């Protein structure tokens, strides 16, 4: 029996972490150029029609059209607080604060202290350096509101320009009660002490973060590197970046943090508030992410960009989050505006390619990756991304070449390399280069012995080749112990039992496998095979016929048709 692509696609392949850069949302002029609706394009027959149309557009990830419909609804019912809140919330996600601010102001007047309105209004005053007015909104935000999670940081930076260091830093005390907030407290305390000219205190906080830089988020490495540069300790920034890359591998974006020119010479109130808003955006997606939190996170990150347009990490955050919400065109519009000279350009191009692939624009995706590979041939992640895309397109020989290029650039025996070995092994197996494939699977297991996907793939490959059957059974059973609810691993275990003549046990596992993954042609075919062997021939034919409806590959289809015509030899 051949090892079909449907069988391969069942395994949960590891995704290489890609960080993309972002830019500002497309403007109204961009919308017109791209065929997006303007207010003149919208025709409604009343409030209900406009409101429902807005909801439908938002549900279909067309934020611009949703805002336009809400504008139309508000022209009919201008004091409707639900419409006002939804309008400014969506406008903020688009980075359109010119529209969001007046709508938020009206909503705030009608329904004070609710929703995102006080944050939007405070940010607008901050943008104008009207710090007292900004504080008047922040000071009234309730600890029970949707903004409560970020309130200590907002209060700290909201008061920083007008209050004493002691008063400002005391606002962070609420965060100190939570152990998982330690890093964020250090980051905000470092920035605030730096803002007040308390350099030694700021350094102590940055040093505390640098001590664990190898496990920090890139956003934190960026923040600490900036603090070191501004305080005249670029040597510490370089040391921290080297420590980070020694564990996490090379990254053009992280390397760019070593350049003092990437940062301003001092922390301004706008930059500090932007950091607080961006930290809030990250917080929203670190715990229990859902669609509403994603929308809130985009709005917070867009507010950070509004205050500090040079904050590239916030731009890429918006782009990635938009992509996660299937706003692929909007994500690409943001990412495509990142300049080649900017930190994060390469990662933004990677995300653009991924977005193209998700839209089934494969040629555009490959062209994007090939361009990056030509200009930055020493960056392994782009070669891995090319390998992944080529493998998915069944261009296995080319995929192997891409993985070869990546693995030559990675440090040898780096634990994180296991994923690249695993994926290259799959491409090699599909290219009928089993000797090399087996070596790669073994190497992946050496670097990551616990991964059920590798265990299952290698074990099933042995079964399919009729080799090392006891070892195949052992590997699959190990995978099953680690992930007993995976339908594809259930199938492999059931098939191992089938191959070894344990038909009754095989029936039990293969029936559960079909329940868990009913749309897989190979699993249904396997169940048909074992039904035939235990004398349940009518059920066997039913499963084979079902397998034919699930898009099997040509060789598999021919084999199934032969079974339907002749049945199977009884063992």
Image (cartoon, grey):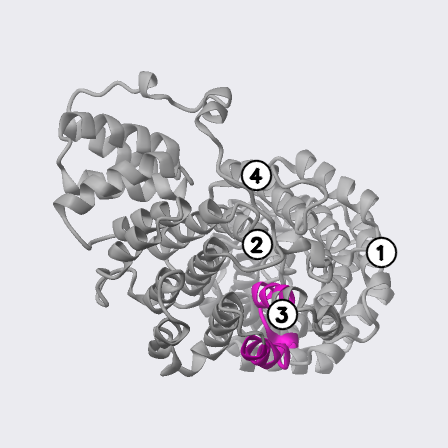
Height in image: 166 above or below 526? Answer: below
Front of the two marks 1 and 3: 1
From the image, tell me which residue sits under label 3.
453
Mark 2 or mark 4: whose residue is earlier in sequence? 2
Height in image: 521 above or below 470? Answer: above
Mark 4 or mark 1: whose residue is earlier in sequence? 4
Mark 1 or mark 3: whose residue is earlier in sequence? 1
From the image, tell me which residue sits under label 4.
332
| Residue at 50 percent of width and 58 percent of height | 540
Q: Position of residue 456 (x, y in %)?
A: 64, 72
SS for callout 4? helix
Q: CA distance from mark 4 to mark 1?
A: 27 Å
Q: CB under 8 Å between callouts 1 and 3?
A: no
In the figure, is residue 187 to the left or right of 497?
left
Q: CA distance from mark 2 to mark 4?
A: 15 Å
Query: Main structural element of the magenta stretch: helix, strand or loop?
Result: helix
| Residue at 50 percent of width and 26 percent of height | 30
Front of the two marks 2 and 1: 2
Mark 3 or mark 2: whose residue is earlier in sequence? 2
Front of the two marks 2 and 4: 2
Q: CB under 8 Å between callouts 2 and 4?
A: no
Q: Position of residue 518 (x, y in %)?
A: 46, 57
């Amino acid at each position: 029996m051949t090892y079909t692509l449907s069988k391969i696609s069942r395994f949960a392949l590891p995704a290489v972490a890609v960080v993309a850069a972002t830019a500002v949302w497309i403007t109204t002029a961009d919308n017109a150029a791209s065929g997006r609706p303007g207010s003149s394009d919208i025709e409604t027959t009343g409030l209900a029609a406009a409101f429902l149309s807005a909801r439908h557009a938002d549900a279909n990830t067309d934020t611009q059209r949703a805002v336009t419909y809400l504008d139309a609804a508000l022209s009919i019912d201008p004091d409707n607080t639900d419409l006002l809140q939804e309008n400014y919330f969506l406008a903020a996600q688009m980075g359109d604060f010119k529209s969001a601010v007046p709508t938020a102001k009206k909503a705030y007047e009608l329904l004070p202290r609710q929703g995102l309105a006080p944050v939007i209004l405070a940010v607008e005053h901050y943008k104008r350096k009207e710090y007292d007015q900004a504080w008047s909104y922040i000071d009234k935000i309730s600890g029970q509101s949707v903004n409560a999670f970020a309130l200590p940081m907002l209060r700290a930076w909201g008061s920083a320009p007008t209050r004493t260091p002691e008063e400002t830093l005391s606002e962070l005390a609420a965060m100190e009660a939570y152990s998982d907030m330690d890093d964020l407290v250090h980051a905000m305390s470092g920035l605030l002490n730096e803002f007040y000219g308390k350099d030694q205190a700021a350094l102590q906080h940055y040093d505390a973060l640098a001590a664990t830089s190898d496990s920090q988020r890139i956003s934190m490495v960026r923040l600490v590197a900036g603090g070191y540069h501004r305080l005249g300790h670029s040597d510490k920034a370089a040391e921290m970046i080297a420590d980070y890359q020694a564990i996490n591998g090379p990254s053009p974006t992280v390397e760019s943090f070593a350049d003092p020119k990437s940062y301003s010479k001092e922390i301004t109130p706008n930059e500090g508030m932007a950091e607080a808003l961006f930290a809030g955006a990250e917080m929203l997606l670190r715990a229990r992410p859902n669609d509403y939190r994603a929308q809130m996170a985009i709005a917070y990150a867009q507010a950070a960009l509004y205050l500090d347009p040079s904050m590239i990490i916030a731009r890429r955050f918006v782009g990635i989050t938009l992509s996660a919400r299937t706003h692929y065109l909007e994500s690409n519009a943001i990412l495509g505006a990142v300049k080649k000279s900017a930190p994060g350009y390469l990662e933004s191009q990677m995300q653009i390619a991924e977005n193209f692939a998700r839209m089934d624009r494969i040629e555009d995706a490959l062209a994007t990756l090939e361009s990056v590979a030509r200009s930055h041939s020493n960056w392994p992640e782009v070669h891995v991304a090319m390998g992944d895309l080529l493998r998915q397109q069944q261009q296995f020989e080319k995929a192997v070449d891409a993985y070869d290029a990546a693995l030559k650039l990675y440090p040898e025996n780096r634990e994180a390399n296991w994923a690249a070995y695993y994926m290259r092994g799959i491409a090699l197996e599909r290219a009928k280069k089993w000797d090399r494939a087996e070596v790669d699977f073994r190497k992946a297991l050496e670097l990551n012995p616990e991964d059920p996907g590798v265990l299952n793939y290698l074990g099933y490959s042995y079964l399919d080749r009729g080799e090392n059957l006891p070892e195949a059974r052992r590997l699959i059973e190990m995978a099953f112990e680690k992930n007993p609810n995976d339908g594809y691993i259930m199938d492999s275990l059931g098939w191992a039992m089938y191959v070894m003549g344990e038909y009754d046990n095989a029936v039990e596992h293969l029936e559960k496998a079909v329940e868990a993954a009913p749309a897989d042609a190979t699993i249904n075919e396997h169940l048909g095979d074992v039904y035939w062997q235990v004398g349940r021939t009518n059920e066997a034919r039913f499963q084979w016929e079902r397998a034919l409806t699930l898009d099997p590959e040509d060789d598999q289809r021919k084999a199934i048709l032969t079974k339907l015509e002749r049945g199977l030899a009884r063992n």
